[in-house]
Image (cartoon, rainbow, N blue to C red):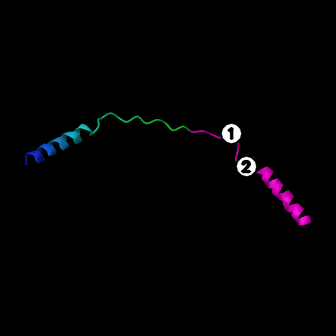
Amino acid sequence: MKKLVLAAALAGAASTATAGNLAEPVVEAPVIVEETTSSSSGIWLPLLLLVLVGAAVAAS
């Protein structure tokens, strides 16, 4: 019975020791990276090649 009381006292002391403090947590601001080029600028060359291949297939 004494071991049970001792274990309960140690568990209670350990849980209050790790409960934390009243200081506010430090939250860093998220880093936002903006792209300078648009995403549609790189699509023109593949589309042009697709049109040329389609024209070559249709002509043959």
Residue 10 - label: none
In terms of depth relative to the viewer, which is nearer, 55 or 29?
Answer: 55
Q: Are marks 2 and 1 in contact (CB under 8 Å)?
A: no
Residue 60: where, in percent of width, then height?
Answer: 92, 66
In the picture, the disc for residue 36 is 1
Magenta stretch contains residue 58: yes
Amino acid carrying label 1: it is Thr
Which residue is rendered at x = 23% and y = 42% of the image? 15
The three-letter code of the residue at mark 2 reads Ser
Answer left or right for 24 relative to 60.
Answer: left
Residue 22 place in picture, x, y as percent: 29, 35
Residue 3, quarter of the rendered image: top left
* Residue 44 or residue 11, whichever sits in front: 11
Q: Within the image, what quadrant is residue 35 found in?
A: top right
| Secondary structure of the residue carrying numbered label 1 | loop
Residue range corresponding to the magenta coloring: 32-60
Q: Which mark is residue 40?
A: 2
Cα–Cα gap, marks 2 and 1: 12 Å
Outermost residue, left direction?
A: 1
User: What is the residue that sits farthest to the right in this orientation?
Assistant: 59
Q: Nearer the viewer, residue 9 or 50?
A: 9
Q: Position of residue 56 (x, y in %)?
A: 89, 61
* Residue count near mark 1 (Cα–Cα under 10 Å), binned few <14, some 14–19, many ≥20: few
Relative placement, left or right, of 54 versus 3 is right
Q: Nearer the viewer, residue 15 or 36?
A: 15
Element type at marker 2? loop
Residue 28 in the figure: left or right of residue 21: right
Label 2 environment density (alpha carbons within 10 Å; few <14, some 14–19, many ≥20):
few
Q: Is residue 34 left or right of residue 52?
A: left
Rendering coords of residue 19 (x, y %): 26, 40
Q: Residue at x 49, y 36 (%)?
A: 29
